[in-house]
Image (cartoon, grey):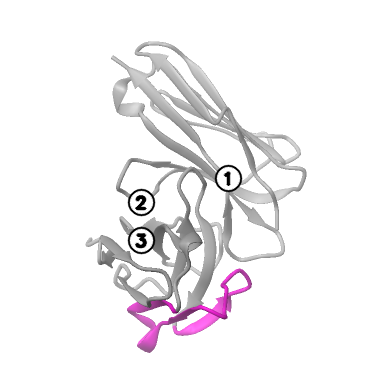
Amino acid sequence: EAGVAQSPRYKIIEKRQSVAFWCNPISGHATLYWYQQILGQGPKLLIQFQNNGVVDDSQLPKDRFSAERLKGVDSTLKIQPAKLEDSAVYLCASSPLSTGSSPLHFGNGTRLTVT
Amino acid sequence: TQLLEQSPQFLSIQEGENLTVYCNSSSVFSSLQWYRQEPGEGPVLLVTVVTGGEVKKLKRLTFQFGDARKDSSLHITAAQPGDTGLYLCAGLDTGRRALTFGSGTRLQVQP
């Protein structure tokens, strides 16, 4: 089966600019996650979708980050305006079930550098 | 949110050596997963443990879940260069539906 697809792979922007990331999950996977992984740290959950509804966005900085999952398939994550501390790898993951114990299938991430 | 502490943070060993990495929390997990992440790639699931005291083996890797479901360990026997990577544990908080990840153990196996 095809894996989780993410684009772009790399993005360099200046602070206060905006940026968007795209994710296409594994076909049929109902649950989609966006994680932020800062260098030297483990992934931190930003938002979890079940189909096209938000399950958990408690750690999403809503003043600058937004995410949507139209039609319950693809998802986009946007940052506007970006700050230096947003430099990180943004990982998208999907799973077939809504329970957190089901395995996550990750994409290869988008590496964002904010200068 | 549970805090997952992994130790050691870094480990550099020679091919053929054995090693153990640890994942600890003060809270109880309903389940715990181990992932390995290589540079430029996303984490890949190695194992899921659910029952306290559970031991799972995956070739040269042995995973153990603590009796109280607050900690876990990963033991690698006769490490190989292909084992190099970032090992992440991830626990499921009983009050949440998404995994919380530890900060990882970065392992380098020298040939």
Q: CA distance from mark 3 to mark 2?
A: 15 Å
Q: CA distance from mark 3 to mark 1?
A: 21 Å
Q: Which residue: 42% across, 15% down?
A: B13
Look at the numbered disc 2 and give the secondary structure of its residue. loop
The amino acid on which the numbered mark 1 sits, given as a three-letter code, is Gly
Q: Quarter of the image containing the N terminus of chain A?
A: bottom left
Chain to which the residue tagged by mark 1 belongs: B
The amino acid on which the numbered mark 3 sits, given as a three-letter code, is Leu
Magenta highlight range: A52-80
Q: Which residue is mark 2?
A: B42
Look at the numbered disc 3 and give the secondary structure of its residue. strand
| Mark 2 in CB contact with mark 1 (< 8 angstroms) | no
Say which of B95 and B84 sits in front.
B84
Quadrant position of residue A74? bottom left
In this rendering, position of residue B50 left or right of residue A48:
right
Q: Which residue: 76% across, 47% down?
A: B27
Instruction: Relative to A102, say whether A54 is above or below.
Output: below
User: Same chain, marks 2 and 1?
Assistant: yes
Residue B96 appears at what percent x and percent y?
A: 66, 65
Q: Which residue: 35% across, 75% down?
A: A19
Q: CA distance from mark 2 to mark 1?
A: 15 Å
Residue A13 appears at what percent x and percent y?
A: 33, 67
Residue A110, magenta (yes or no): no
Q: Which mark, residue A112?
A: 3
| Mark 3 in CB contact with mark 1 (< 8 angstroms) | no
Chain to which the residue tagged by mark 2 belongs: B
Chain to which the residue tagged by mark 3 belongs: A
Q: Which residue is mark 1?
A: B102
